[in-house]
Amino acid sequence: MKIDIVTIFPEMCRAPLGESMMKRAQEAGVLSLAVHDLRDWTTDRHRQVDDIPYGGGPGMVMKPEPFFAAVRALKADSPDARVILLTPQGRRFDQACARSLATESHLIFLCGHYEGVDHRVVEALVDLELSIGDYVLTNGAIAAVVVVDAVVRLLPGVLGDARSPEEESFADPAVTGHGPLLEAPHYTRPADFEGMPVPEVLTSGHHGRIATWRHEQAVARTQRNRPDLLGENR
């Protein structure tokens, strides 16, 4: 997969996406990642990327010209690349969306800032507007890191043989055979820590009982923390 991120804060993306599994995915050739400074596509000597909004109001709005130039350049050899804008006005990002994006060959992420992006960018360039939650961040670069991490870890070979995405929270119902559930609790050594023992079933070696316990715990945790996933009211 190829991913391009366009932002005015490139280092906010490069550092976290250069560690752990994201680093290994790039070293293994599973991921080709490039983080670009939007200002590289400005044409004035001040490298201006924002201006005052028409109609008045607080703050500044990001100009369309640098975004159009950036997307045209990045799509020159990849016209089918999918362009995604990170914005509080977007569709809420979830695991189903991550799975869908993981099937794409080239993603271009545009990161907003200030009061937002000139809407002509949305109308003419953007295929999907995404939000990572119902809150407002300082800028879209932070959200881009979250989305890229969630997507890339689903690519074949990124997690390695010891971990399967189907065993995690929000796993695909078509694969698991049940609705999206949160993961069951996990334990490791010591078997007893300050009077808190590991559940006996996990030390029994009985794989059938362990699987049943984990499913029951997943349902209970989902009912407690995310009843909305089960169609229940909080």
Image: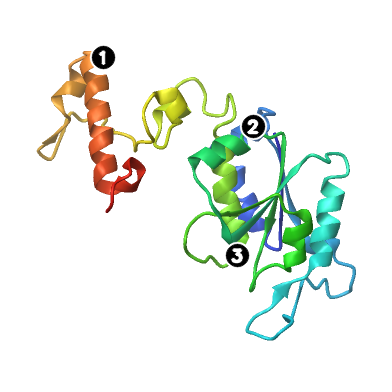
Separation (CA) of disc 2 from disc 1: 33 Å
For disc 3, the marked residue is: 139
Extreme bottom residue here?
56
CB atoms of marks 1 and 3 within 8 Å: no
The reply to whether residue 185 is in sight is no
Front-most of 141 and 122? 122
For disc 2, the marked residue is: 103
Instruction: Determine whether 118 is above or below 210 in the image.
Output: below
Closer to the chain start, of discs 2 and 1, is 2
Instruction: Determine whether 219 is above or below 43 in the image.
Output: above
Closer to the chain start, of discs 1 and 3, is 3
Extreme left residue here?
195
- Residue 179 image position (x, y, % from top left): 37, 33
Q: What residue is at 46 percent from the left and 26 percent from the top? A: 174
Separation (CA) of disc 1 from disc 3: 46 Å
For disc 1, the marked residue is: 207
